[in-house]
Amino acid sequence: MASTGLSLPPAPAGLRARGGGVRRRTGIAYVFLAPFLILFGIFVLWPAIYGVWISLHDWNPLVPLQPWVGLQNYVDLFTAGSVTSADFWLSMRATAIFTVASVPFLLVIPLLIAVLLNQRIRGGTVFRAIFFAPYVLGVAVLGVIWRYLLDPQLGVVNHVLGLLGLPSDIPWTVDVPWAWISLVGVTVWWTLGFNTVILLAGLKGISADLYDAAAMDGAGAIRKFWSVTLPGLRPVMTFVTTITILASANMFGQAYLLTKGGPGHATRTAIMFIADEGLSQKQMGAAAAMSYVLFACLAVISIINFRLQREKA
């Protein structure tokens, strides 16, 4: 083929230097990310992949050979009358009850507190610290304290109610619906400070000019809240809603320490049943399959939440 004799001019030196600088900065960024990526791969990515492998076996750590069962562990979960199906879906029902009961409180109450703390009030920093303080407690400390306070026989709460002339025989941790009320109340008291801080940071990011413009249009406090505050908080609310749903659906410590999953198995959440099935019963294959079914449910809920709350173009 004949040559045309034409050749492209060399790239400008500044452009070549700029491209080299971008590659160098990208390389430096990956160097700084490397420790996290290594830890993520070792402690998150590899266990997730290995968990899928376990779920395809009748896995028992006490047995040298692990029989391959394919998808049978998953099929059993959706087969009525199987060993794991009824108990697993009962625990999923308990998880759903707790999530539906706790998430609205963990969104509405922190939002109202954040709006109040966003005002110029005296001692605002002190109030922020007060609301956030319970969150620094570990779940073990939280469980021991509230199990003592809510004990139906010797608990401080029933004793105080008796002094006030109110019913003092409330079975806070041994009967439903009181056990659910206790779990939701304790969880809201414990974690609302975290959501409050995040929402307060989101409120600080809303321009004051928007409120001034709304005031010039004659908007009152309620109208400003619906037309300025909530739209401005949409990205933050999406994040807070998602992490709150995930945290509630993975609740373990409160139920384990306060109610032991009782009465009966009424408050035994999915995480509690999975832990018992895998660690106590040594049925790790079935437990792994349950974990991935729970993961799939939470993934779907998270996607729906993002789609419902995404900003309109």
Image (spheres, rainbow, N blue to C red):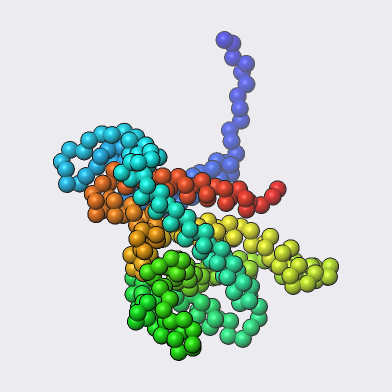
Residue 159 vertical placement versus 240 (above, below) = below
Image quadrant for the N terminus?
top right
Q: Residue 145 location in percent, x, y?
A: 36, 77
Q: Nearer the viewer, residue 35 or 119?
A: 119
Q: Residue at x 27, y 38 (%)?
A: 57
Q: Is residue 64 left or right of residue 228?
A: left
Q: Residue at x 31, y 33 (%)?
A: 70
Residue 95 vertical placement versus 116 (above, below) = above
Q: Residue furthest bottom?
A: 163
Q: Residue 258 location in percent, x, y?
A: 36, 69
Q: Is residue 29 left or right of residue 207?
A: left
Residue 130 vertical placement versus 16 (above, below) = below
Q: Residue 141 location in percent, x, y?
A: 35, 74
Q: Residue at x 29, y 51 (%)?
A: 277
Q: Residue 247 location in percent, x, y?
A: 45, 59
Q: Nearer the viewer, residue 238 or 144?
A: 144
Q: Is residue 11 left or right of residue 35?
A: right
